Image: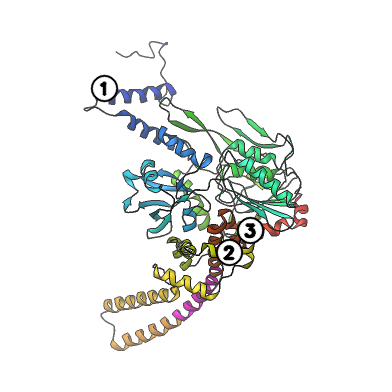
Amino acid sequence: RPANPESNPEVKEYPKNHPDVVDKKMVGLLQLIRFAYVEEVDMAPIVEKGMVTMLEELDPHSAYISAKDLQKMNEPLVGNFDGIGVSFQPNNDSIVIIEVIADGPSSKVGLLAGDKIVTIDTMSATGKNANRDFVFKHLRGKKGTKVNVGIKRQGEPEILHFEIIRDKIPLNSVNTYFMIDKENGYIMLTRFARTSVEEVRDALKDLKAQGMKNLILDLRGNSGGYLDVAVDLADEFLPKDELVVYMEGKAQPKESFYATKDGFFTKGRVVVMVDEGSASASEILSGALQDWDRAIIVGRRTFGKGLVQRPFGLSDGSNVRLTIARYYTPSGRCIQKPYEDGMEAYYKDIMNRYRHGEMLNPDSINLPDSLRYQTAGGRVVYGGGGIMPDVFVAVDTQRASDYYVALRAKNLMNRFVLDRLDGQREQYLAEYPDFEHFYENFRMDEAFIREFYDYAAEHGVPYTNFKEAQAGKFLQELIKAMQSDSALDKAVSYEDYMSRVLWAQDSMQSYLMEKARAEDARQKAYAAKSDKFLRAQLKAMFANNLYGSEYYYQVTKDVDDAFARALEVLKDKRLFNELGIR
């Protein structure tokens, strides 16, 4: 018989959410299943599913990782492998692409972070197949082999199909570096891996030896990595003892991280390029350089991942990565964006930025005064999630026409280049013995482009006039609406009907001409820019296949509006002085 707490003061009655009550409840349930359930039960998968669900209730980044998945999760930061070049996460019976490795096979065909893999070759990748074992087994394979994936992309009504040629995935964190001109250098950092500090130092030394005085550090699409690597890289740009970042949580006392030495590049103008794909360690580094007025940040608001996960090993070799604290920049800004509205809203945040106009106009971002902070020099910066750039660069909406998107989906540009080089590689290398000769002298005349158009048409992507297709679709819909209307209006006279038809025909013709002119102007703008971009992509893929992946961006930078703006800022001494950037 249970004791009555009122008659026995030694018996405590705890509230339902007391830790002791909750713990006993969980243990009690497990014991009931083990000893009272009608059949024998394998408890391990049940417990694992329960752990996953519990952690999902906490925040977007706390996670359970099984023992067999642990090594695979760490691979992007420590090694290399043959595959398609994506990091992914099973989520709600589907496979979500978290990161597309720059210049990897998936990047080249147009896969994007946030895409959902729904098929691999002829097999479904949803439901029971939405697990790491299935994906690793079927996406990985020997270099040069092909795999077809079906992608569900937000905003696209149909499944997109991509043919990907597996390759050795480049996991060097410095994707490329080079001198832009006699004084200005460029480094693209794609992740914060164990080798990153050494790679960046080597790049800085080489660039300085070539005469570099100023630097563009490109962190676009860099989803982060190790905290200590971000701190060590900040060392290269900040004087000794300046705060880089601090973290703090309920059970985590405030812990601050400082520059430990005078860095290799503490003098000279610095521009850091960021976008909505820059996260975590990228935000720590860019936030520190912004708060200390060491660099001008150019681009768009970063992702906003400022939660600190610490790995806790479990008895079976599995791992729980539990959020223990939040990151704060030197000025006190919290990097983490809100996640109180649930996981779905959290992961749709980037798409919502597009919809709300933030990617096109910084005035679409409304930030309250409570989120205002100041840099060391007194400049106003904002918190609230992510790092706000000092110089905004809108997303390029005219970069890719419908035709170009279709080409990328089938990997036709890279396939064309590979087919063209098959049997002619030595001839190309004889004519262009190194990248410098190739970059200066390689040209694509109209005959070359026509050959590519024919190649694409043979492989299912003809050079279609989308304007005419859209006009034809509109015509069919309008006629269908007219027929439906006349069938319903039983009382209409023949004369009224004919006058309405003639009026509709005149209106339709006028409307179509107006729409056609607008669409023609739009398509011409798209086509001009997309044609330029298409040519640059083809040239870049030749460079990639002839000289190495590090030369790919040295070509495509010529059609990169954000790069052009960053270089313009880097050369603007007056702007650096106005902002007090040292």
The percent coordinates of residue 416 (x first, y second) are: 46, 65
Element carrying mark 1? helix
* Residue at the farthest left position: 38
**Residue that carries the numbered disc 1 in the rendered image:** 35
Instruction: Work out whether 19 lies above or below 494.
Output: above
Q: 267 or 525: nearer the eye?
A: 267
Measured Cα–Cα span from mark 3 to mark 2: 31 Å
Magenta span of residues: 511-530
State the image quarter where residue 365 is shown: bottom right
Label 3 or label 1, whichever lies nearer to me, is: 3
Q: Residue type at mark 2?
A: Ala
Measured Cα–Cα span from mark 3 to mark 1: 64 Å
Element carrying mark 2? helix
Q: Residue type at mark 1?
A: Phe
Q: Is 461 on the left-hand or right-hand side of 421?
A: left
Q: Which is more N-terminal, label 1 or label 3? A: 1
Q: Which is more N-terminal, label 1 or label 2? A: 1
Measured Cα–Cα span from mark 2 to mark 1: 76 Å
Mark 2 crowd level (few <14, some 14–19, many ≥20, 10 Å Cα): few
**Residue that carries the numbered disc 2 in the rendered image:** 430
Q: Is 216 on the left-hand or right-hand side of 161?
A: right
Mark 1 crowd level (few <14, some 14–19, many ≥20, 10 Å Cα): few
The percent coordinates of residue 375 (x first, y second) are: 71, 44
Q: Residue type at mark 3?
A: Phe
The percent coordinates of residue 148 (x first, y second) are: 38, 55
**Residue that carries the numbered disc 3 in the rendered image:** 563
